[in-house]
Image (spheres, rainbow, N blue to C red):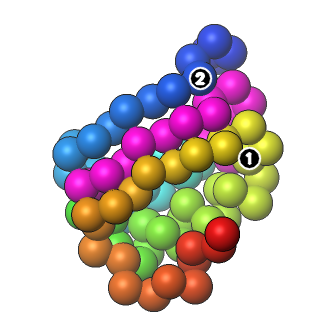
Amino acid sequence: RNTSLTSLGLYNNNIGDEGMKHLSSALERNTSLTSLNLMSNNIGDEGMKHLSVALEHNTSLTSIYFGYNFYVNRQYIKN
């Protein structure tokens, strides 16, 4: 278990909804990551749904960059 990683850049890695499902599972348990870059990863509504569930449990993330993805339903994005 890594407790020192605070920033993770995954820009342009074609993660997609399935990859976001697995990443979200890890984010639910992570306690050190504060910044996450998910820009340009072909993440759609299903991936955003997984991320929103993970964020209900994650207390360390303070910034997430997810522009240039394919989500349409903005109900998963809260300010």
Q: Nearer the viewer, mark 2 or mark 1?
A: 2
Tell me which corner region of the image, top left, top right, bottom left or bottom right, holds residue 37.
top left
Locate the C terminus by quadrant.
bottom right
Q: Secondary structure at mark 1?
A: loop
Mark 2 vs mark 1: which is more N-terminal?
Answer: 2
Q: Secondary structure at mark 2?
A: loop
Q: Tag 1: residue type?
A: Asn
Query: Which disc, if any, is residue 58?
Result: 1
In the image, residue 42 above or below residue 58? below
How many numbered discs, if any? 2
Q: Residue at x 63, y 34 (%)?
A: 34
Q: Main secondary structure of the magenta part?
A: loop
In the image, residue 65 above or below residue 44? above
Q: Residue at x 58, y 46 (%)?
A: 63
Residue 68: image location, x then y, percent: 26, 63
On screen, residue 39 versus residue 23, left or right, reads left
Tell me which corner region of the image, top left, top right, bottom left or bottom right, holds residue 45.
bottom left
Q: Nearer the viewer, residue 38 or 46?
A: 38
Q: Residue at x 67, y 44 (%)?
A: 62
In the image, residue 13 above or below residue 4? below
**How far apart are the two marked residues, 2 and 1, measured between alpha carbons?**
13 Å
Locate the N terminus by quadrant.
top right
Q: Tag 2: residue type?
A: Thr
What is the span of residues highlighted in magenta in the rendered image? 27-41
**Which residue is outermost to the front?**
79
Residue 18: image location, x then y, percent: 35, 60
Residue 29: image location, x then y, percent: 71, 38
Tell me which corner region of the image, top left, top right, bottom left or bottom right, holds residue 50.
bottom right
The residue that disc 2 covers is 6
Query: Which disc, if any, is residue 25?
Result: none
